[in-house]
Image (cartoon, rainbow, N blue to C red):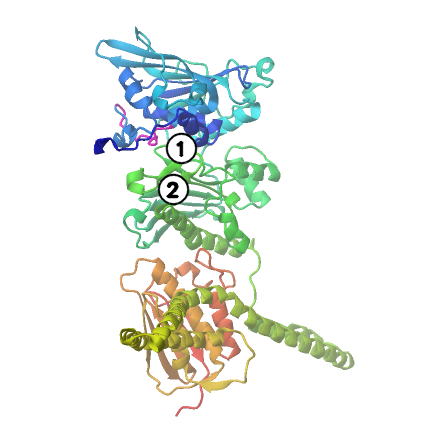
Amino acid sequence: MTDVAEDKLRFRPKARIIRTIGDRLISGPEAAVIELVKNAYDADASFVEIKFTPPLLPGEGRISIADDGHGMSLDDIRLKWMEPATASKVKDRCSPSKARKMMGSKGIGRFAAAKLGAKMALTSTVETKGGRTAVLIPELDWSIFSDDVYLSDIAIDYLVQSVEEPTGTTIEVLELHESWTKDRLSKLYNELRRLLSPFSASQEKRDDFSVYLDLSDCNESAVGFDPTDIFEGADDQTEESQYPGKGKRVHPFPLLSTCDYELSGTLAPNGAFEGSFTIHRAGRGSEKITIPGTGIKGSDSAGNVEVQLYLFDREADALKSNMKAAGMGNLTATEARRLLDSISGVAIYREGFRVRPYGDPENDWLALDTRRVQDPSLRIGHNQIAGYLKIEGEHDSNLLERSSREGFEDNVAFQNLARLIKRLLAEIVEPKRFDFREKAGISRPRSSSFDELKELSELKRVRKLVALLEPKQREQAERIIDKESQRLSLRVDAMRERQRVLEAQSSLGAILAEVLHEGSPEATFVQKSADRMNVMLKSFLTGDDGGKNKAREFFSARIPQIKASGDKLANLFRALRPLAGGKRRQPALFYPIKTIKDALALFENHKVDVSVETTAKGMEFLGHSEDLSTAMVNIVGNAIHWLETTDIAEPRIQITLSRSEEGGHVFIEDNGPGVRREFMERIFDVGFTLKDGGTGLGLNIAREALARSGGKLRFHPEHEAGALFEIVFPTGPEN
């Protein structure tokens, strides 16, 4: 009998798994080169050189990637380099001599050479006790990994010898898979520029890692183009550089700090932000910005994030002026916009290197353009921002890199990072920019209220001029004006009624969210109970005594539960009925307490303490109860949003009713973050919102709904702890 210990299954990887790693997990030849550059950085190199030797055609040519790092010993190559997906960089997260945070962690970067060419050679020189030793792999033909053999059967020839050359590693890729045209080399050059952090370029000290691109062997006769056309902002090595070659140093794209608006600061792990905001276009100084945290904890946090956002208006004069100030010369408006398009986006950097693809002009990972389509006058688009984020390592940030093709895993930490950046735009940048542009007279005019339109329809200014005419002419003119004024007034009334229906529809998304939140579990419970009751009924009618007793117990317990769920659904639908926008009745007396509590029923499952008190028992309002419901749903919904998206220890809303000579009063007070002073005058404007994804309609809808019943909505700016709104509503006779 076979020993139990031998009854095991073991994986036997085929050799082609190596080709799969290189070909499938690395997105393209540019990404493959970048993987090898990162390996040089991890090896404590002060420079890496990428050299292209023509002809740069499929099956020909050579690419060499050389660095002056610590090199690899024979044991390093045997035990680390030759092991796919080795965990060595996961265990040793810092490089040995310069203590750099390691960029690689997947153990696949070395196989990037397979993406570039059919063959490779490797020379690595390392310092040993007996002197310098070089390990040479003369030729590694990647085609052997395509054969139907097992990986363990592949053997690679190598040589070891003593040398005098400095330490470092050179990988030569032979028989290229693809043509390296001028466009592809230009793309690589720009990828390398984006790889390097622009923050280091803005500092006076020289960075300790340099990248060089050597096209000195390329000329127009050999490759069909002049290689000098590719380089932009590159120079030769500086005197203190240890680089001995002929390549041009790759410099990162400079920070385009000559912008219209600038936000800089730090996001804390809990979502709090501290920094400054500057409107350069206004010529004002920086303004200190502080936003409270959102309660993010543990593995849901993206850690500490340094934020630098440069934002632009795209009007021709402003953009051309910015580009000229940045040293770009006298560009046309089209050229200036094209340049901004080429550097737009929000890039993410870790340990001095960009995490691809964030920051690519075509990678709108924050979905800024989707937000802008919904509200172009307020929102910032992807092509209006050149932003940079600096994040911590994987352990501190919980942001896990997948591959050069995919960026970060779409985990909660990454989702929170995106949400927090959009929060900064929605609560700081966009409303401040909107306010500045309107005051400067460069934004679209804001919409007038229906009361303003009604007043305009009376044509008072025209009537004053008509009064100066001769009596006969004045009488004729006044008849025409009266007729036109009446037409305008009727049109405004029709528009207001249409607006009322649209308001009901505009709140539909929020209402549906509450219906699904509140009603779906109850409806599911009723549905499943009905199915179960149908089964139990058969047992009750035809079963034995045991089955009948079990059925009785089930019905006795389940029927009260079904009634409770039915009552809850009925209450929910009753609360929604006033918001449906149906045909209006004549104004009538109603009890505001009942209307308010019905509206609050929509939010009863939110973790916010809501209390209602009155000092005017028995008070009746005179008007349309649905107008009060609409206002309450929008105001309370607003308060709950801010209470739930900020880290408030004991969130609460206090609603108080009272009566005065002016009418009935409803005070809605919360202990949330309140409204920042600079936005207090704008909160009722159509389209103005501080929410990411908000419509900017809620408070305007509330005010217009109350106006239809002769009511008013007021905001109390003097209230310091949270926000305080007041509804004033016509009342019936006092009992």
- Residue 428 or residue 469, whichever sits in front: 428
Residue 583 picture location, percent across and down: 56, 79
Residue 56 lies, with reference to residue 505, above or below; the image says above
Any magenta on residue 548?
A: no
Query: Which residue was labeled with disc 2?
Result: 409
Q: Mark 2 is on which residue type?
A: Glu
Q: Which residue is at 61% across, 39% downward?
A: 334
Q: Nearer the viewer, residue 202 or 188?
A: 188
Choose the circle earlier in sequence order: 1 or 2.
1
Q: Which residue is mark 1?
A: 197
Q: Position of residue 32 (x, y in %)?
A: 44, 27
Judge whether 724 appears above or below 296 on screen: below
Within 10 Å of disc 2 (Cα), the crowding (few <14, some 14-19, many 20+) is some
Frontmost residue, 211 versus 608? 608
Residue at disc 2, secondary structure: loop
- The image quadrant that residue 49 belongs to is top left
